[in-house]
Amino acid sequence: MALKRMVLEIGMGTDIRGADYTKAAVRALRDALWHNSLSIGAAVGQPADAMQVEVLIGVPKPDQVDKAEVLAILPHGTGSVTVVEGGLEIPNEEGTGSTVIANCCAIVRLDV
């Protein structure tokens, strides 16, 4: 058998005042995952933990994302996290803080 892409989920997350890239990334993955319930594994005779999830996060400063913290919120299966340059950072008018927007996609694969 071979890994087949079964699902592509897309999300967005923000940290409004703290410029916390990890918080925005975690919220983006939650947004991608928490709006559905995948029954694809059961449909092809596999348990939910058979899913392999590739998480791709886009933020302006990729090195500021804690990948382990992002990965920890996956409810099933195993996964990997790649962080690339993307998203947005919007400074406030005083220049003392900013809003961070992270984009996320989660690609779910099964060995079928």
Image (cartoon, rainbow, N blue to C red):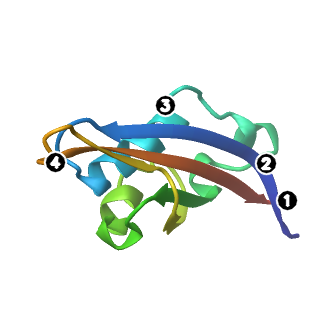
Number of marks in the rendered image? 4
Answer whether labels 2 and 1 touch (C-beta < 8 Å): yes
**Spot occupied by residue 58 in the image (x, y as percentages of width and height):** 51, 57
Q: Which residue is mark 3?
A: 34
Task: Measure the C-alpha gap from mark 2 to mark 3.
Answer: 17 Å
Task: Measure the C-alpha gap from mark 4 to mark 3.
Answer: 34 Å
**Spot occupied by residue 52 in the image (x, y as percentages of width and height):** 63, 61
**Spot occupied by residue 28 in the image (x, y as percentages of width and height):** 44, 42
Q: Disc 1 or disc 3, which is closer to the eye?
A: 3
User: Which amino acid, by three-letter code, is at mark 1?
Assistant: Val
Q: Which residue is mark 2?
A: 6
Secondary-structure class at tag 2 = strand
Task: Measure the C-alpha gap from mark 1 to mark 4.
Answer: 52 Å
Q: Earlier in the sequence, mark 4 or mark 2?
A: 2
User: Which amino acid, by three-letter code, is at mark 3?
Assistant: Trp
Secondary-structure class at tag 1 = loop
Residue in the picture at 22% in, 39% down: 92
Q: Which residue is mark 4?
A: 95
Answer whether labels 1 and 4 touch (C-beta < 8 Å): no
Q: Residues within 10 Å of mark 2 (few under 14, many from 20)?
A: some
Say which quarter of the image contains residue 110.
Answer: bottom right
Q: Disc 4 or disc 3, which is closer to the eye?
A: 4
Decide which of 12, 87 is in the foreground and name it.
Answer: 87
**Spot occupied by residue 1 in the image (x, y as percentages of width and height):** 88, 70
Task: Measure the C-alpha gap from mark 1 to mark 3.
Answer: 24 Å
User: Which amino acid, by three-letter code, is at mark 4?
Assistant: Gly
